[in-house]
């Protein structure tokens, strides 16, 4: 009898129940999404290589370093390899909104310095031996339907060709990454192609290098090496700041603000709002059930059963919302990962994120059911029957 009565109570106000279930569903989805984003940012930092250092301008990441610095840095004891990185910032010609990351790199040291980059199609030799060759991530290739040996036109924004034509890069390899610190939505091409175009007047734009990446020899003290590189240019002409890859990534994320803190704040606000929405629903339900509670007590049901019915009702409503939210997560998992992984390399819906969302939903149901449940449990039979009269 109590079980049938509880189900009847939930269905007594179908619109209210549907709205409450819907709000819990949205909360589960948002909490899962936000937790996945924060976990992705953390994974990007945790999976950064311990044997790579980044040298940037001490003024700003947007200030380029002189080309002459490369030879001096390479001579520092402990540096195994050095690779230039230059942000290109172009746009895909065949998709006016098609923006993705492009970097000019030293083709002869890039792949050696990043063993987590695995060639899925094509060959490393094809990329390194051709002046206009590029290597693209598998997610980026899938997004635009690119194939090997295809020419990709990129309209320059920072670096523009003087003839007004787009830059053309030939895809000679498609890569996948074994670590989230390197995303699969980026194009890499020969820095020399860019430099030669600038020097011969074929293009215009800022000269220099955005970042020097240093691959450190095993057993080298990275902190001492970083200090030695910084000391080289203490008196200019451009002071530098050398950091570990993890710290560099952390600084890059912090340029957007305290993203993890903001996401956690949004998640807390969502939980706060949904909790009081469900609590209000259950308090209303508890007041409506006061006469029923008095009748049940008159029939011999104890306080635990009478109060437990409201707790169960809260769990049932939130449980249905959690199931619906989990279904939405699974339904939207692929498109959201395709969209957000380009901006958050470590982003991925995980079982842990989903369980967290569902667990918090059930906790809301439990707490919101306990409040009215305790109230009706404390009422005597006479009080319960008299309160509604």
Image: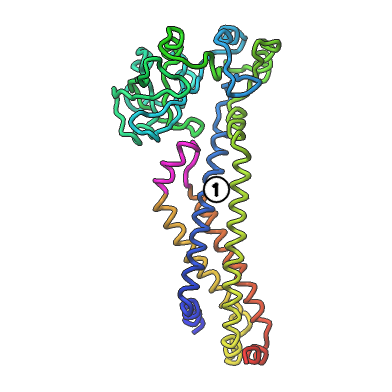
Q: Secondary structure at mark 1?
A: helix
Horizontal arrangement in the rendering, residue 265 relative to residue 14 (left or right): right
The stretch drawn in magenta includes residue 339: yes
Residue at the image position 51 percent from the left and 19 percent from the top: 85
**Span of residues in magenta:** 333-349
Residue 270 sits in quarter: bottom right
Where 140 sits versus 123, above or below? below
Tell me the colour scheme of the image: rainbow
What is the count of numbered marks?
A: 1
Residue 370 sits in quarter: bottom right
Residue 163 sits in quarter: top left
Can you see residue 124?
no
Q: Position of residue 259 (x, y in %)?
A: 60, 41
The stretch drawn in magenta includes residue 293: no
Figure quadrant of the C terminus: bottom right
Can you see residue 342?
yes
Where 1 sits versus 261, above or below? below
Residue at the image position 33 percent from the left and 34 percent from the top: 144
Label 1, residues with CA under 10 Å away: few <14, some 14-19, many ≥20: many
Where 348 sits versus 314, above or below? above
Q: Which residue is mark 1?
A: 35
Q: Position of residue 33 (x, y in %)?
A: 51, 49
Q: Position of residue 214 (x, y in %)?
A: 56, 17
Q: Position of residue 189 (x, y in %)?
A: 41, 19
Where 382 sits versus 142, above or below? below
Residue at the image position 45 percent from the left and 62 percent from the top: 323
The one nearer the camera, 196 or 378, is: 196
Horizontal arrangement in the rendering, residue 197 relative to residue 383 (left or right): left
Residue at the image position 38 percent from the left and 23 percent from the top: 135
């Amino acid at each position: 009898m109590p079980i049938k009565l509880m189900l009847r109570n939930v269905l007594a106000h179908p619109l209210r129940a549907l709205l409450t279930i819907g709000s819990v569903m949205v909360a589960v989805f948002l909490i899962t999404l936000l937790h996945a984003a924060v976990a992705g940012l953390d994974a990007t930092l945790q999976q950064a290589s311990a044997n790579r250092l980044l040298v940037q301008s001490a003024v700003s990441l947007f200030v380029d370093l002189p080309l002459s610095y490369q030879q001096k840095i390479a001579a520092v004891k402990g540096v195994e390899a050095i690779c230039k990185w230059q942000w290109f910032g172009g746009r895909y010609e065949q998709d006016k909104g098609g923006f993705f990351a492009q970097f000019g790199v030293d083709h002869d040291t890039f792949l050696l310095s990043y063993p987590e980059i695995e060639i899925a199609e094509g060959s490393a030799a094809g990329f390194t031996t051709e002046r206009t060759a590029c290597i693209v991530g598998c997610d980026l290739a899938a997004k635009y339907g690119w194939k090997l040996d295809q020419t990709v036109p990129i309209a320059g924004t920072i670096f523009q060709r003087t003839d007004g034509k787009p830059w053309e890069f030939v895809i000679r390899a498609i890569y996948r990454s074994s670590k989230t610190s390197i995303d699969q939505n980026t194009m890499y091409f020969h820095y020399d192609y860019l430099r030669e175009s600038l020097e011969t007047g074929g293009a215009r734009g800022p000269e220099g290098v955005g970042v020097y990446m240093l691959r450190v020899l095993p057993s080298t003290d990275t902190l001492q090496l970083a200090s030695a590189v910084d000391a080289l240019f203490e008196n200019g002409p451009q002071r530098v700041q050398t950091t570990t890859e993890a710290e560099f990534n952390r600084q890059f994320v912090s340029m957007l603000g305290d993203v993890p803190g903001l996401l956690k704040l949004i998640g807390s606000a969502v939980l706060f709002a949904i909790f009081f929405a469900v609590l209000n629903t259950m308090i209303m339900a508890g007041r409506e059930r006061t006469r029923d509670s008095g009748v049940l007590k008159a029939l011999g049901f104890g306080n635990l059963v009478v109060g437990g019915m409201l707790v169960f009702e809260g769990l049932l409503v939130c449980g249905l919302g959690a199931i619906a939210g989990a279904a939405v997560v699974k339904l939207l998992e692929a498109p959201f990962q395709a969209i957000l992984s380009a901006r958050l390399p470590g982003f991925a819906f995980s079982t842990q994120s989903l369980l967290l969302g569902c667990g918090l939903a059930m906790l809301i149901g439990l707490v919101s059911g306990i409040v009215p449940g305790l109230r009706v449990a404390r009422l005597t039979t006479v009080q319960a029957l008299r309160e509604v009269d």
